[in-house]
């Protein structure tokens, strides 16, 4: 199974209304609630693809209970560790008349040192059954900024490859622990390195210790820098829809590729098709299977040599 870790799990609440009237009362037409956080989104996608998955992380209070109840009703195996603090909610207000969304993000609980130590022990009991572990998303308050480095070292000791999707200090302090793969988006890449050129920034993260760097560049697709080579991959078309969670779909596909050991061009083609299919689905953690199937054979993957100013590109049709 693939283990996904969501340290700041959330209950994602979506309010649908016609139009928001600021400074007044607004009647909500429909409400939807589901468990969220980036690791949960990755697990939903793996589960929908038929791959065994276990969700872990920290969940507390009434909101934590609601998160776990929703995981159960979605059929996701839940091994969250209970904590004393109240898990966070995120509130999205969708204004249907203007097609606009306003999002409120609660900070989430403060985790104690004792709870964090207990969580490390808990993950250690789950790792022996895992073929890969995915570490995704922001850290709740109270955790050390190198929390992911601790988890990466644990996974390394157990011989389990780890995929990291984080930003800021949580990302930069984890690189020296040697993640098998990191997947920053364009902003995270620049923030982590101070470099605006994505190729130079991806190379810098690779040199800092990530075995592979796959940067996601929105509709421009993926850029991979690995020990085996470097590639760019992109969807033949830009899709309209909800890009939130597209990165999580890319992480799901790249983790599966890591587990199966497929050649890099195939992994990247699958990640581009699946993440584009996630844009076409309205909720983060879902994808449109028809778009996924239709795009899979159309994604173009090009190898390149990431050594400016002599970079060369050659087009390779992808299976
Ligand atoms: N408009 C789009 N059309 C087609 N594919 C897209 C589009 N937007 C994103 N993608 C695909 O999704 C991938 C991930 O997108 P993006 O770089 O926005 O991730 P992200 O910012 O990490 O997302 P999140 O963190 O919300 O999951 C891209 O590399 C690309 O393959
Ligand atoms: Mg992301």
Image (cartoon, helix red, strand yellow):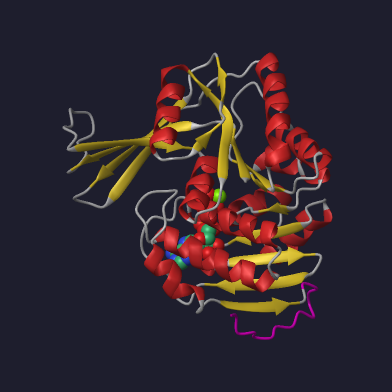
Q: Main secondary structure of the magenta part?
A: loop
The x, y position of residue 131, in whole percent, is 69, 48
Figure check: 146 above or below 280 = above
Residue at x 72%, y 26% (from the top left corner): 120
Please tell me in which quadrant of the rendered image residue 183 appears.
bottom right
Residue at x 68%, y 56% (from the top left corner): 259
Figure check: 207 above or below 14 = below
Figure check: 157 above or below 69 = below
- Residues rendered magenta in the picture: 306-319
The x, y position of residue 276, in whole percent, is 46, 64
The x, y position of residue 215, in whole percent, is 64, 59
Residue at x 17%, y 43% (from the top left corner): 18
**Residue 100 visible at all:** yes
On whether residue 15 falls in the magenta region, the answer is: no
The x, y position of residue 14, in whole percent, is 31, 38
Q: Is residue 104 left or right of residue 190?
A: left
Q: Is residue 171 left or right of residue 310?
A: left
């Amino acid at each position: 199974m693939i283990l996904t870790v969501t340290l700041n799990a959330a209950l994602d609440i979506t309010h649908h209304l016609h139009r928001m009237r600021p400074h007044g009362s607004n009647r909500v037409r429909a409400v939807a609630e589901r468990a969220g956080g980036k690791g949960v989104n990755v697990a939903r996608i793996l589960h929908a693809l038929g791959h065994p998955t276990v969700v872990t992380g920290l969940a507390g209070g009434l909101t934590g209970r609601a998160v776990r109840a929703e995981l159960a009703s979605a059929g996701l195996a839940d091994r969250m560790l209970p904590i004393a603090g109240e898990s966070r909610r995120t509130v999205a207000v969708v204004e249907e008349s203007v097609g606009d969304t306003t999002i409120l993000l609660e900070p989430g609980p403060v985790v104690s040192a004792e709870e964090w130590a207990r969580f490390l022990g808990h993950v250690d009991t789950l790792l022996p059954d895992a073929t890969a572990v995915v570490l995704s998303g922001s850290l709740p308050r109270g955790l050390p900024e190198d929390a992911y480095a601790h988890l990466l070292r644990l996974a390394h000791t157990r011989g389990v490859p780890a995929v990291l999707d984080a930003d800021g200090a949580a990302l930069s302090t984890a690189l020296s622990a040697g993640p098998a793969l990191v997947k920053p988006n364009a902003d995270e890449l620049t923030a982590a390195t101070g470099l605006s050129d994505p190729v130079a920034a991806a190379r810098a993260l690779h040199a800092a210790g990530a075995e592979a760097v796959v940067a996601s560049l929105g509709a421009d697709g993926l850029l991979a820098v690995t020990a085996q080579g470097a590639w760019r991959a992109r969807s033949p078309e830009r899709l309209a829809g909800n890009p939130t969670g597209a990165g999580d779909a890319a992480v799901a596909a790249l983790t599966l590729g890591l587990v199966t050991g497929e050649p890099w061009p195939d992994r990247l083609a699958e990640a581009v098709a699946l993440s584009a299919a996630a844009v076409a689905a309205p909720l983060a953690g879902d994808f449109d299977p028809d778009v996924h199937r239709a795009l899979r054979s159309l994604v173009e993957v090009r190898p390149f040599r990431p050594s400016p100013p002599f970079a060369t590109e050659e087009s390779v049709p992808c299976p």
